[in-house]
Image: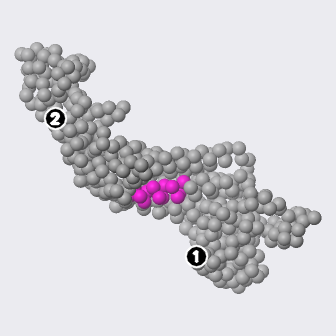
Amino acid sequence: MSSPKNSLANKSKAWSGRFAEPVAALVQAYTSSLHFDQRLALVDIAGSLAHAEMLAAQKIISKSDFLAIQKGMAQIEKEILAGKFDWQLALEDVHLNIEARLTKLIGDAGKRLHTGRSRNDQVATDIRLWLRTEIDQILVDLKRLRTALLDQAEKHAATIMPGHTHLQVAQPVTFGHHLMAYYEMFTRDAQRLTDCRRRVNQLPLGAAALAGTSYPIDRERVAKTLGFEGVCQNSLDAVSDRDFAIEFCAAAAMFMMHVSRLSEELILWLSPRFGFIDLPDRFCTGSSIMPQKKNPDVPELARGKTGRVNGDLIALLTLMKGQPLAYNKDNQEDKEPLFDAVDTIAQTLQIFADMVPQISVNQEIMLSAAEEGFATATDLADYLVKKGMPFRDAHESVAHAVKLCVKKNCALSDLSLADLIKACGLNPKSNSIDKDVFTLLSPKGSVHSRNHIGGTAPKQVLAAIKRARTSLKK
């Protein structure tokens, strides 16, 4: 026989009339979402008020009921913000907790609030409202990070460093140009999130459980009140769709992938083997056993948290892949991965926006590294092509010059003009190479020669920064 306590708990549930016995305590704990969906409380109230206002306007509930609902919701919001709201696990989720409190405060008017809606379309609306606000803040912080990259890039538009492919020295670039590559990545992230927001910002409310409602509701009125751009066009899809959450997590995963790439480089550059940069102590930690250590924990953690956000995306994709229409209880599991992805990228953005402006650069070490590894070999090949040599022949000739430098343990710019001509297999009387070649064989000459849109020449880096700042103002 069920205990009086369990019977009372079951009677408190909005759906208990159909059931002859109470939910087991273990099942109650297992099925409750209250411990994580409380964060939807304020948007749940906003959605409910818009729904109630529409019901009153359509004369589905009385004006006095609506005014009572307004007053009760104001009290509930005050209690939640003050941390005094009495959350009840037996009431399963944030929605039923708020409805039960409302009914206790205002009586039958509170029971009329749920007319013409279901928890299915209610929760779908709440998630969209919540995510929309989060995206807006993320975009603000992403703009701050992009601005920090622009500021650093402008400061180092002419700071020369080695560019790498395969993590091997490839060609000289500028640090400003390198940072602008990340600016481009984060700009695409902002574009993806902006585009995602449009699909988030569609109203499911009015779909009810799955088939719509027989009440004469005005969905467009609710959409306008809540700031939605439109309404979901199919009631089955409206309650069961989580594409918008998956799309956000996909955008979040790509953002974190970009952060992880930047983090990897910061970690390498901070290493004494590179010594290109330094980070303020407040973004690093030490070792419990090695007193000399300065560990780049922020970039390392961001690199690690990327896997976490990737997991959130995979969790949502897996959650949805086998679900028939329409709503299923599986969808209760949509919130924790989504909440985690939002929290992770929001925190990451804030700390990187603070950290990037504080990166200090060792320009001398960067320049010295750019002079290693025959980084201007391609410049020599291009020089020969401009003198009339086919590129493949020029490539072969420069390869021989590099071999000589390896043998002599010197840079290309250290060879004499005669040695350079001989190493390239050229006729000394052909005038294929003149003294002006040594200008191009310097890292400075190399970067300045790449003077076109997208190139690493300081002039082009500054032009790219100017275009970016104009775009950010829009």
**Outermost residue toward the right in this view:** 1
The segment highlighted magenta reads: 341-353
Query: What is the spatial separation of the Cα atoms under label 1 and label 2, in whole angstroms?
Result: 63 Å
Please tell me which residue is depicted at 43% across the width and 51% down the height of the picture: 288
Q: Residues within 10 Å of mark 1 (few under 14, many from 20)?
A: few
> Going by the image, does 243 lie left or right of 269?
right
Q: Position of residue 404 (x, y in %)?
A: 19, 19
**Outermost residue toward the front in this view:** 289
Q: Amino acid at mark 2?
A: Ser
Residue 113 among magenta residues: no
Residue 348 among magenta residues: yes
Query: Taking the image as drawn, is residue 137 in sight?
Result: yes
* Residue underneath mark 1: 81
**Outermost residue toward the bottom in this view:** 64
Total marks in image:
2
Name the secondary structure under disc 1.
Answer: helix
* Residue underneath mark 2: 442
Q: Position of residue 307 (x, y in %)?
A: 52, 45
Say the numbered circle drawn on residue 406: none
Determine whether 314 is above or below 215 in the image: above
Q: Quadrant of the C terminus?
A: bottom left
Quadrant in which residue 383 is drawn: top left
> Going by the image, does 297 lie left or right of 397?
right
Q: Position of residue 279 (x, y in %)?
A: 32, 53
> Going by the image, does 355 lie left or right of 65?
left
Residues under numbered marks 1 and 2 in contact, where contact means CB atoms less than 8 Å apart: no
Q: Amino acid at mark 1?
A: Leu
Query: Taking the image as drawn, is residue 149 in sight?
Result: no
Q: Residues within 10 Å of mark 2 (few under 14, many from 20)?
A: some
Q: Position of residue 236 (x, y in %)?
A: 71, 54
Please tell me which residue is depicted at 84% across the width and 71% down the height of the picture: 5
Q: Quadrant of the N terminus?
A: bottom right
